[in-house]
Image (cartoon, coloured by chain):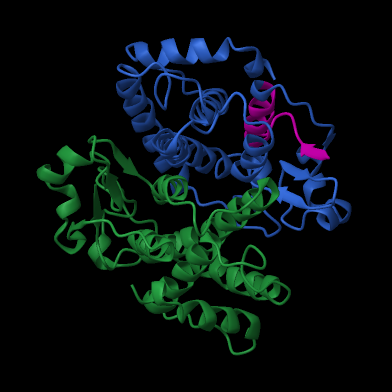
Chain colours: A green, B blue
Amino acid sequence: MRLYDYPVAPNCRRVRIFLAEKGVSVPSQMIDLSMQEQLSSAYRAINPRCTVPALQLDDGTLITEVLAIWRYFEETDPEPPLLGRDAKDKALVTMWERRMELDGFLPGMDAVRNFLRSLKSRALTGPRDYEQIPELIERGKMRLADFFQDLDGHLSHSPFVAGAEFTAADITGFVALDFVAGRLKLPIPDDQIHLRRWSERVAARPSFQL
Amino acid sequence: MRLYDYPVAPNCRRVRIFLAEKGVSVPSQMIDLSMQEQLSSAYRAINPRCTVPALQLDDGTLITEVLAIWRYFEETDPEPPLLGRDAKDKALVTMWERRMELDGFLPGMDAVRNFLRSLKSRALTGPRDYEQIPELIERGKMRLADFFQDLDGHLSHSPFVAGAEFTAADITGFVALDFVAGRLKLPIPDDQIHLRRWSERVAARPSFQL
């Protein structure tokens, strides 16, 4: 088994944190996105989708997409559950994790990928080039401000994103927030005390040092 | 239990097909998107996210997001499994379903929602208005052409999207294709025989008449 990984990529971080919370160790190989190694013919032969993270199983099967890699390890290493315990809880974790992605992670990626000069013609991940669309920078930032505010309100009555326990929804929420805060210099506003409390609590977990 | 539904909305269709494949019947209530009923104060009180589909459980819990509603019924009504059987299979279904969404469904929504006059200021679903970005129409169409071509290639060696069995990945793939073909008048090109064969086979299932 091998995990194709790149330390700086937020989607890779989502997988590393998940594995650390499970206590699972997987040999990894770095694909250097700063050198566009994901577009090399060698990596294309492994993953024609040209993305990281990607997990290769011992039988050669390649699993791409964070949610799919998470699902694999949730099934093989169920404890502690990070995708929910019973039917209702699993549905709520799925819902909250997705909201963190749709409302936080994707607008953040829009704002960053359409802004950075180094990603000119690389506005979307994958094997094909797409030009940047400058309007998505401003829209991304507007949506992120709403995301911060909405999440602060939600966390005023919920210890973690999906309820009483730490789950994958916290991973996506925090990685989105941290990536955005760093790249776009959008810190948590002073009055969003619930978001700040949650953020500090999550950031202190050993898995988040990865 | 109650499902908030709107017949024309492609995300609602993904849920209806899933339930029909499971043989599960849920009382539904129509939220008329053509009258912007999702933005009414009555529906906001139920679902502040202002989206359909949404599933209300008997204890009052509201579950939004297609993947979350699917997950609920996959747990309560496991047969037939639509999200995979074992760890590897579940990961592969998750991966393929997500590719259908990222590569087909989302570009299709981009192209449609940024194009229709009736959706001016409603380029994104949810409680807040966002202006249309015309560049996303053309990009959406380019990406859809790639989606058709990639999926045709994949289906040349796979009976269904995620392998030998019908799964949720076929639902998202077909609904994206059908919605796009109808709204954007982008039919399957004549030479994409594998995509056509799969599309006809899936469309003939009773659940897809819904």
Q: Position of residue A102 (x, y in %)?
A: 54, 56
For the residue pair B81 and B195, the one nearer the viewer reads as B81
Residue A114 can be seen, yes or no: no
Q: Is residue B3 magenta?
A: yes
Residue A15 lies, with reference to residue B118, above or below; the image says below
For the residue pair A19 and B205, the one nearer the viewer reads as A19
Q: Position of residue B51 (x, y in %)?
A: 71, 48
Q: Where, quadrant-wise, is the N terminus of chain B in this rendering?
A: top right
Drawn side of residue A79 relative to residue A163, left or right: left
Drawn side of residue B81 relative to residue A46, left or right: right
For the residue pair A38 and B2, the one nearer the viewer reads as B2
Residue A143 can be seen, yes or no: yes
Residues shaded magenta: B1-20
Q: Is residue B155 magenta?
A: no
Drawn side of residue A153 relative to residue B81, left or right: right
Q: Where, quadrant-wise, is the C terminus of chain B in this rendering?
A: top right
Q: Residue at x 35, y 66 (%)?
A: A115
Residue B127 lies, with reference to residue A175, above or below; the image says above
Residue B3 lies, with reference to residue A194, above or below; the image says above
Q: Residue at x 47, y 35 (%)?
A: B97
Drawn side of residue B65 relative to residue A41, left or right: right
Total marks in image: 0
Q: Residue at x 71, y 41 (%)?
A: B53
Please identify the quarter of the rendering in which residue B48 is found: bottom right
